[in-house]
Image: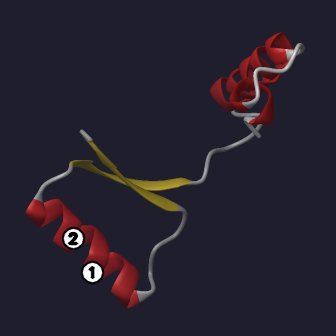
Amino acid sequence: MFTRSLYQTDDMQRQHDILTRVAGRVDSQAIRTTLGAHFGTITADNLRRAHAVLEQGTAKGKIVLSGF
């Protein structure tokens, strides 16, 4: 997905255009992200909580921890 920016191709602007269109579609809910749960800042407790959900096999979508 990021080949253009990684290799500094002549058509890097096209990648921006594509990502802008995708972002607009996500914002308008025409497409949905794979975000399943946001557990907040990365802490030991939140890591345990996320790991427990994965171990139970009940996770749907991506589990997000922020603050890296």
Q: What's the residue type where badge 1 is placed?
A: Ala
Q: Which residue is mark 2?
A: 49
Find out whether the residues at labels 1 and 2 contact each other: C-beta distance under 8 Å.
yes
Question: Is 26 on the left or on the right of 11, as rendered?
Answer: left
In the image, what residue occupies the spot 69% across and 33% down? 29
Q: Find residue 23 and report its horizontal and vertical position in percent.
A: 68, 24
Which residue is label 1 attached to? 52
The quadrant holding residue 37 is bottom left
**Element carrying mark 1:** helix
Residue 13 — which label?
A: none
Quadrant where the image shows the N terminus: top right
Establish if 63 lies above or below 57. above
Q: Position of residue 40 (x, y in %)?
A: 23, 46
Residue at the (18%, 61%) spot, across then down? 46
Q: Nearer the viewer, residue 6 or 18?
A: 6
Residue most toward the front?
A: 7
Distance between mark 1 and mark 2 Cα atoms? 5 Å
Q: Nearer the viewer, residue 33 or 15?
A: 15
Q: Say which element carries label 2.
A: helix
Amino acid carrying mark 2 in the image? Arg
Q: Outermost residue, bottom direction? A: 56
Image quadrant where residue 16 sits: top right
**Residue shown at 27%/80% (left/top)?**
52
Q: Residue at x 80, y 27 (%)?
A: 4
| Residue 41 pos. (x, y %) | 20, 45
